[in-house]
Each structure stands twice: as C-alpha cells, then as structure tokens.
Amino acid sequence: MDNFLALMDGFAVAMQPIYLLYALGGVLLGTAVGVLPGIGPAMSLALLMPITYTLEPTAAIIVFAGIYYGGMYGGSTTSILLNTPGESSSIVTALEGNKMAKAGRGASALATAAIGSFVAGTIATVLLSFLAPVVAVFAVQIGPVEYVALMIVAFLTVGALLGSSMLRGLASLGLGLFIALMGVDALTAQQRYTFGSPFLADGIDVVLVAVALFAVGEALYVASRLRHGPIKVIPVTGGWTKWMRKEDWKRSWKPWLRGTFIGFPIGTIPAGGADVATFVSYASERKLAKGENKKQFGKGAIEGVAGPESANNAAAAGVLVPLLTLGIPTTATAAMMLVAFQRYQIQPGPLLFETNGALVWALIASLYVGNLMLLVLNLPLVGIWVKILQIPRPYLYSGILMFAVLGAFSVNFTPIDVIILLIIGVLGFFMRRYGYPIAPMVVGLILGPIFENQLRRSLAISQGDPVALISSPVAATIYVALIVIFALSFWLRRRQRQFESMVVDATPSGTTNDEVKA
C-alpha cells in the first residue's frame, strides 16, 4: 500500500504541465533518434548530458527516460519500412516486418509494433513499480563486502556477455577501469596514471568519455558504413485506424503478452538486454506457430513483429530494476542514465528509494505517461517519422559532431577537453571497427571508483584479510548467482545465434550485417 501511495505521489508530480512537456520532448526526441539508423538512445543521452547543468534533477531524468523509451519505439519504423533497424534491438523486427511491408501490409506491421510496445511497456512498468521497492528492501541489508561481490558480477557479466567476444569485452572493461583510476588517489593524495600531465590530475570526466564514444566514435563508424544513394522507403497507405484487422488482433495479442514476460526478466539480468530478448521471443513465436501461420514465418508473419517488439520494450523496463535498486547498469543506455544521476550527486542503489523516493516515483510515473504519449505519437504520425529518414546524412552526422564538441567544451570550458574528446572518439571508432564493445568500457569507467572505495572499506574492516570477501553468506550467494547468470546468458546467446543467420538473409542487397547492427 505504501508503494501504491508513493506511486500516486509520483503521478502528482509527473502530471504537472511542465513535466508533461519534458516527457513529451523526451519521447519525441527518443522516437526520432530511434528512427534514424545508428543514432540510439545512448548517443542521445551522451549528447544531452550538459542539460544536467541547467535542469533540475526530476526534469532531466524524465527527459532521459522519455528518450530511452522512445528509442525502443522508433527503431521498429525503419526496420519495417527500410529494412535497416534504427536500434540493434530492432534487428529481429526487420525479419518479418519488412516482408510484411513488401507484401503491402506495412501498416499492420507498424500498428502491431506500436500497440505491442505500449502493452509491454505498460505491463513491464507495473512490474517495475512493485518489484524494484522489494529488491531495494533486501539490497539495503548489504555491506561493503556484498557490494564488492555485486560489482564483480557487473564487471564480469557486462564485460563477458556484451559483444561477440568475451576477451574483447573484458579488454574494453579493463580500458574503462584504467581511465577511471586516472587522477589523484583519494587515500594517498598521489597522482596516478597522469603521465605527468596537469590536465589529467583531476581525471577524465565521465561525460567527456561518454560523448566521445557514443557520439564521435559512433558517428564516425556509422557514417563510414551506411550505404550511399537515395533511401527507398516502402510507402504506408490507408488511415491508421484501419491498419489492424480482426485477424491481426487475434494473432497479435498472445505474442504481445509472451514477449512481455520474456523480455522483462531478461532485462533485469546482465544477459544482453533487449537484443537477446527479441531473438528469444522470435524463436518462441516461430516454435509455437501452427498451420498456415507457421508457414508465413520468413515471408511476413505478424507474430514475428508483435512478440519481439513487446520483448524489446519490456526489457527496457527490466533494465531499470538493477539500475535503480543496485546502481548496476546492464546496457549502454542504462550506464548513461546512471551518469545523469551522478551529475546531481545522486547514487542509484539500495538507499535510493529512501533518500530520493520522490524523484524515483516521479520517474516511474513518467514512464506510464510517456508510454501513452508514444502510442499516440507513433500511430497517427508515422508519416512524419518516415520523413526524418530523408535528412541528408552529411548534415546529420556533421551536426552530431558539432554538438559533441560543444558539449565537451561546456564541461570545463577548456580546449584540452576537445582534444581529449577527439582522441577518445577516434579510439571509439577503431573499437567499433574491430569489434570491441563500447558498453563495458563505459560501465568500467562509471563503476570503477565505486568498486575501489567499497573494496578498500571491505579490506579495512577485515584488516586486510581477502578471505572476508567471499566468507559472507550473502556474498557467497551472489557469486553462485553469477554462475547461474553466466549459464543462463550463454544459453540465451546460443539461442540467439541460431537465428542471427536469418538477419543476414533479410538484409537488403549491398548492405552488410555490421551496417544493420550499427
């Protein structure tokens, strides 16, 4: 009952006109960046991080949450009409959605994706509302030793499971931890890893690295991979109110629910987030289909759009559970939201619901509101989102680079930050070029200082005995959970790889699979 009353208080805040405008702006921008190939929510949050200097916390977090949810919606539009997913989690949607569009049923594909996203987003947000406080109650009881165990779980799972190669993921994580340790040691007051440069004495700002990796590096990579020439978008005909036939509703509602309850639990663990959830949902729908419906898979089955899009949005809500209750981001976008919290000196974790309960419940309430806004925006206004695809790519990516430079300069108003931005941005380009995932590096950069502080506290309490790090019953349970997570994640990955070959077959001629995933 207390949680329900707190949620009502959150709605009282989120429904204020000014916060409704912030939510609307967030979902509009999120949908736009989801539509554009290669420009995802993580890049958008990195570019907009400077707004934390001017907006108060509730407004900024609501904007960022709107962008997060909107990006999940927008990715389906280009997957269906262009066969080029705007988000990697929308790759599966392209398998059946584009085939439906080519068969003249693009309107039905867009409608089932939008409605499924709304259904899944709403149910998953309800689960988030009641699950997160319960997890937080248990999390309050953990001490430094247990927190070290949680950090190790986060490092190993994110480093090993995000990306195609475990070694490359761990190398990216190590690089992030190295950058996190730059600057002055808080305990000894000695400089470390500064190479004698006074500019590195205070370390490298997290926002600077995030903008460099997600904006500069990603823009360079995507711009180098996208095909040239005019973009051919499959037209959508008919009024949006007639897009879903009775048969479409009958075939879609079960995949919507199944996708929701597949995506949410996968999103709560570091198992690959929405990407894995969409592949598992697609595999489930293909296996459960019968008769003529089963024969349509590979030719434009509506279940292959409804299920994965529901799993996509449900996983997005699931990712917020470990972020808000444990302070552990399991995706790149969640890592950027963690940075946004930290800019306001707010640390997500076990005490967040006690110390900043009003902010958290306003955020959760804004997810309900934003989800409804997205349904209203995506169905009637799909023609406007399609026109965004006509923006000339040189203008688009030059604009991204310009805003990245301005954002980097605004951190400390020093030219050296721009130089660091460009250096790390080029590094990010080559990391993407050679298959090194970006997310583990950002997670290591963000959680590295927290891990160091908790590790030092744990060793101080145990008088330097490292056995104390594993002797706690809760810590031992966490390490056992780590083994279970790895086993489950590798099983999910194996299921995903069974269907990845279909993505290559569904890619338009002259387009590489890397380009689609970008």
Image (tube, rainbow, N blue to C red):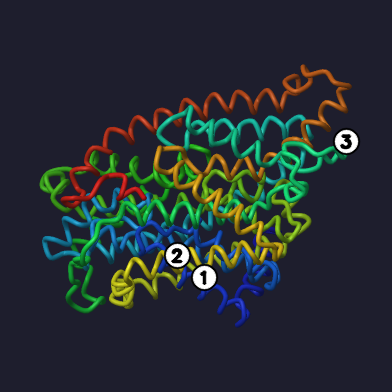
Indicate the quadrant where residue 219 lies: bottom left
Q: Is residue 277 left or right of residue 204?
A: left
In this rendering, position of residue 174 left or right of residue 377: right
Residue 121 position, x and y percent, is 45, 59
Kind of residue at badge 3 = Thr
**3 or 1: tag closer to the N-terminus:** 1
Query: Considering only vertical position in the picture, is 479 above or below 159?
Result: above
Which mark's residue is nearer the viewer, 2 or 3? 3
Q: Is the Cβ of the residue at disc 2 closer than 8 Å to that at disc 1?
A: yes
Residue 470, position as x, y percentages in the image: 72, 21
Mark 2 to mark 3 CA distance (whole Å) = 45 Å
Q: Give amino acid for label 2.
A: Gly
Are there few (<14), some (14-19), or many (20+) residues within 10 Å of tag 2? many
Q: In the visual, does 196 lie left or right of 387?
A: right
Which residue does the numbered mark 2 point to in the structure image? 70
To which residue does mark 1 refer?
26
Looking at marks 2 and 3 on the same chain, the residue that comes earlier in the sequence is marked by: 2
Q: Secondary structure at mark 1?
A: helix
The residue singled out by tag 3 in the image is 188
